[in-house]
Amino acid sequence: GYKPINPQSIHYPSYDLQKGINFSYKFDVLGEQGNKKYAKREVANGIRIVAVSLTNNSDSDFNVGTQVEFFSGANRVFLMDPMDVKNAIKQNMDQFLLYLLISGVYIKVDNGGGSKVYPVGLIFGPLLTLDNMVTAASANKKLLEELIRYNLSDKIIRKGETVYGIISFQGTGYDPVSIKLKN
């Protein structure tokens, strides 16, 4: 399954102020919410998924997509498209086809004068396969929906407004994340 990140409910320990913009972030949000499979794939694919909070205390509105640059340490990072992130870390459903191997399992029950054979694998193999594939597909869909809902790429933040989002970028370290406003 998939447990939502809900960036608005996260406590943000990191804080940065840039020209009237308060910026806070938190790493490892997938793992902390109990999405261990996705968290492992995040690390294995060299992606960082970060929950962020932006508060506009400046005198004007700004567009995150055109006026904000994100940095990890001293390196500028480019935000990934939600669909690319989902495709990189999604649960692969092919692995669940292995449950079909138990389709050949039979149980033989002796009852005194004879025995009867029950093909339990023909029932449980396909059911387990189908259940796991549907669950994984649903979890992948929920992940994508949340990444799209909290995508900041073209988000306009009004004066006095606080916006929560999820950003994703290529990176393997835990260098501090910061922003720089373009003029």
Image (tube, rainbow, N blue to C red):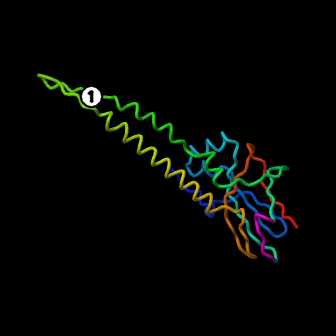
Q: Quadrant of residue 144?
A: bottom right
- Of residue 121 and residue 157, the one placed in the foreground of this image is 121
Identify the element where label 1 is drawn.
strand
Q: Quadrant of residue 161?
A: bottom right
Membership of 36 in magenta stretch: no
Q: Quadrant of residue 150?
A: bottom right
Q: Judge from the rendering whether residue 103 lies leftward or rightward of residue 29; answer left or right.
A: left
Residue on which disc 1 sits: 107
Q: Position of residue 114 (x, y in %)?
A: 14, 23
Name above or below for residue 11 compared with residue 95.
below
Q: Position of residue 42 (x, y in %)?
A: 65, 44
As drawn, the residue found furthest toward the left would be: 113
Image quadrant in which the C terminus is located:
bottom right
Name above or below for residue 100 compared with residue 88.
above
Q: Position of residue 129 (x, y in %)?
A: 42, 40
Membership of 62 in magenta stretch: yes
- The stretch of residues the image draws in magenta is 60-66
As drawn, the residue found furthest toward the right would be: 183
Residue at horizontal 61%, vertical 45%?
89
Task: Name the residue type under label 1.
Answer: Ile
Q: Judge from the rendering whether residue 101 lies leftward or rightward of residue 112; answer left or right.
A: right
Q: Position of residue 163 (x, y in %)?
A: 69, 68
Crowding near pointer 1: few (<14 within 10 Å), some, many (20+)?
A: few
Residue at horizontal 67%, vertical 41%?
45
Residue at horizontal 61%, vertical 47%?
87
Name above or below for residue 61 compared with residue 143.
below
Q: Judge from the rendering whether residue 93 lies leftward or rightward of residue 45; answer left or right.
A: left
Name above or below for residue 52 compared with residue 30.
below
As drawn, the residue found furthest toward the top would be: 113
Residue at horizontal 73%, vertical 70%?
156
